[in-house]
Structures are given as structure tokens and as C-alpha cells.
Image (spheres, coloured by chain):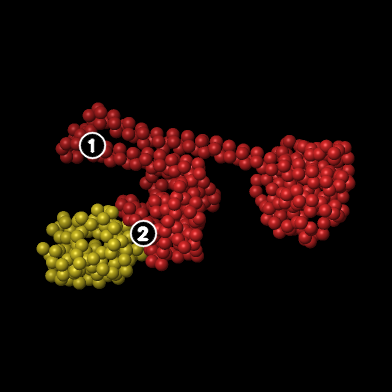
Amino acid sequence: MVPSGKPADGVDQTAETADVLIWPGPGAPEVQPGLVAALCECGIRTRVRPEGGPPDELETGTRAGPMAGTILRWSTEATPAELAFCREILSEGRAGVVMLVASGAARDAEPGRLPVRERTGGATDLPPKDTGADGHLLCADPAWGAGALVSLAEAAVSLARERASRERAAAHIDDLAEAERNFVAIASHDLRTPVSTLRLVHDLLRTGLAASSGTSAGRQARGKIDVEELIDIMARNLDRMDAFVNDILDAWRLYRGGYEIEPEPVSLNAIVEDVVASLFPVAIRKDIALDLVTEPAVGLILAGEKRVGQVVANLVGNALKYTPPGGTVAVCTRRDEGGALMEVADTGPGIGPEDAARLFQRFARGNARATAGEPSTGLGLYICREIVESLGGRIWVESTPPDGSRFFVHWPAAAAR
Amino acid sequence: MEITRDRQGDVEVLRVCGAILADANEEFTAVLRRLRAEGCFRLVIDARDLDYVNSRGIGDLVSFSRDAHMNGGRLVMVRPGPSLMKTLRTVGLSSIVPSYDTIEQAVEACAA
């Protein structure tokens, strides 16, 4: 038996990642001398599970976790309990492949014809389909010798990698399909609404129902609509479409490999001051106190001026969007370890844990509604996150509804990179 | 925020120090309301030590400026800092609220 917690030759017991986790069963015989070393020599990162290790050490699933997906169950005998245990590991998604090495596990298998795919020997079968598990159970006999076991382990690792790759591809396709569905849903609403309005304005102008001459009361008396009003409506809707198209294009650029940002030392305070000043008309119109407190010692950050401005405008714009009249949006900057911290706090309704968890994903829209019906593409925070992370920064939110939200961005200092 | 009032003829001089943030808005609004009630529409704001004015404070200045014009008065400023100037320009207030280097110049312009 592999001594618990003791390092075996050639094994990195502390490795965060491994291809194969050897998991000795209770009272199992000692692992064949040199097997672990032989696996490592073949480039198979091997780790031996310490006895009584914490449950997360068993997380070898192909979706996430420290392992790549193969458990080598080293056991005494292929008892029904052992086989059930192996199937359970697969059905729970802890591993993509389980390789059971135990007497009687592969009594009908032929080691000379390895590698095998889904070889079950005569003693077991694949997990039933109705469990939802689609992993593989490979069986081997400890008497086969290190060479045959290593070959089978290679086949197991290959199967696990293949499965992981398939899952990644499937997840990517799901992701694309969801993005498409979201895009169609949002485009049909966010573009059709302003287009319908513009068409209505066009019709009014064309049919002569609008007039620019005379007083407002006079126009009203003549049943005419003010041209100036219509021009404002057109401008607002064109702005809305412009913002939507820009967000879509930005999100697409990011999805295809990100912006080409050439980071340079820029003043975070100067950018924040400019953006906040540009949003004053919105804040005044909505009767929101837009506060700004900048710490002079913040210094320079390493970023692109335009992109930092985009992030600040998005966060402050969002805060203004969801804060009711009479509320406060406070922006502040301060020094932080290795850079600068920007905080945007508001007195809006706050963000629940479910919304917060997916807030920075594409097309994510929370339950909160903009107080003046402002549009949202659900792309703004996704774009923010992509920009911030591509510059080596970090963005997150803290919120306890209904007491508002606090968005934070850590920007790396110009000297930090 | 700290506000001190000084009367020079029919011109009121408000020296505002610090920052007008959310917690100071009420006080600032109240001072302007009192000036309106007293019929004082010739106002100099000494902004030499004014670090920041938030949106609500700027909104107050916009509406006071409008009321001052309607009542034959005027709102002027003394040396607002670059940040405040930027904000005033953004909301279109810089063209209707002129700035002066000294209080004397501002008072003279306001009284004229």
C-alpha cells in the first residue's frame, strides 16, 4: 500500500494539478514498486491521495478542480462495493475516467492488447446511462506488471483529456448559442423600440403634423407638434441606438481577442474628474448628488486613457441609472497595494447575490430597473471586466440590498508592471 | 464645507471652503434660499478654497444664476479651481457665471 502522505519516488505530492490521482482503497496491497515513477517518466503527472485527505482533494472532475480527470483506484479486490464506488465517482463527475486496479477486475481482459477503450472485463459494466454519467471505467489486474498498467493509464489519461476537450467544446457551443439567443432578444427590443419611435417621428414630419413656427400654445391650438421636441426625441433615440451598436461592437472585439490596448502611465484622477464632470447634466436632471473625492497621492496607473474612461463612465453611468431621485452616487479614488482603487457607491436598490454572481457576464441584466427607463444592453459590465482584467486589474461588486451597491476597480500602478 | 457671509454694499460675498458633497448640500441650498428670500441676487462666490462642488451644488448654482438674471442680479465667482472650472464648462455655466481673480473685481462686476 502506498504510505499515506509519504512522498513516493518521482511524485510531486503537493502538485496542484495532476493527470492521475492514485487512490488506494482500504487495506489495499502496496502499489507496485516503480509504477508511480514509471507514470511520471511517461509524462503523466501523478499524485497519491493522502489517507483521510480533505474532500476537495478528490475533485478530479474534468470541468474544474485541481486534477485533470483520472482516478486510479488501487484496491485489493473488485468487490461489488468497489465497483459501485468507482461508478459513483463517475456519476458524480469527480473524474472523467476511473481505472480500477484490483484482483478480478479484468479477468477477461488481455494486457497485450492495450490500450483499450471502455474495456470492462467480465466483472463490471459502464455506468448506466440513466445516471447521466458518461465517463469511462477501465479495469486492470495488479498482476499485469508496471508496463501494462502504465499503458492503460496512458489510455485513461488520453480518454480523460478527450472528454475534457469535448466538454469544453460543448460548453463553448452552449455559450455561443446563449449569446445568440440573448442577442436576438435584446436586439429585437433595444433596436426595434428606437427604430419604431424614429419611424413615428418621420411620419409626423412627413405628414405635416409638426410645426416650428409660432408659440407652443399656438402650435397646440393648431394641433401641431413642436419640431424641436421631435428633434430631441430623434436625438435621444439615435444616442440609444449608437450606444447599443457600440456595446455590441466592443463586446464582439473582446470576444474575438480583446482590445489592442497599449498601456501607458495615465492619471486615474484626471480621467475620473473628466468623466464625472461629463455626467453632471444627467445627475442634475435626475436630482442625484454626484460626489467625487480623489486622493492626490493616487498617482499614475498603467492603462489606456480611453478604456479607463469607458470603465469609469460605465460604472458611474450605471449608478446614476439605478439610483432614484434624491439619492447619492459617490466616486472616490485612493491608493491601494500595488496600484489605485476606484470605488463607485450608490444609494440604489442594491444587487442580490444571484444577480451579483452573473453581473459581469455578457448580456447579464439584473432585476433592478433603471429609474428613468434608461436602456441597458447587458454588455457594459462585461466590457468593463474585460478591459480591467486585460490591463491586469480587478473589478468586483459588494452589495447588501436594499442599501445600494459599491463597485470597486483595482488598477495596477504604472510602476507595478 | 464651511460658508462665511460678507456684505459689500448690495453685493453678498460667500466664501465657501472645502467641498460641497452630499452631506453639505442641504446647508448650501439653505444659504442660497435665504439669499433669495432676502432679495439678494448680486452674489459673489469666493471659490479660492473650494475643492469640489457636486452635481446638486452645481444644480443650485444653475438655478440661482437663472433667478439672479430674472431679478436683475448676477452670480460671479472668484478663482474657481481647475476641477470646478471643468465642471462649470461641462454644464454650460462658465459662460454665464464669469470668474475673476480678486474679490474686489468680482464685487465691482457684480454691482455694475
Out of A372 and A275, give the one closest to the viewer. A275
For the point 62% across and 38% down, the residue is A170
User: Mark 1–mark 2 contact, CB under 8 Å?
Assistant: no
Out of A38 and A194, give the one closest to the viewer. A38
Q: How packed is label 2: few (under 14 Cα within 10 Å), some, or many (20 or more)?
A: some
User: Residue placed farthest to the top in the image?
Assistant: A207
Residue A339 visible to the viewer: no
Where is A347 relative to A153, above or below?
Answer: below
Residue A121: where, in percent of width, then height?
Answer: 84, 38
Q: Hey, which quadrant is residue B12 in on the image?
A: bottom left
Q: Left or right: A317 with respect to B4? A: right
Identity, as a three-letter code, of the amino acid under mark 1: Val
Q: Left or right: A272 with respect to A119? A: left
The residues bearing labels 1 and 2 have C-alpha atoms spaced at a distance of: 39 Å
Q: Write down the colour of chain A.
A: red
Say which residue label 2 marks.
A270
For the point 82% across and 53% down, the residue is A34
User: In yellow, which chain?
Assistant: B
Out of A41 and A212, give the one closest to the viewer. A41
Residue B48: where, in percent of width, then height?
Answer: 26, 68
Q: Left or right: A337 with respect to A227? A: right
Identity, as a three-letter code, of the amino acid under mark 2: Ala
Say which residue label 1 marks.
A227
Residue B52: where, in percent of width, then height?
Answer: 32, 63
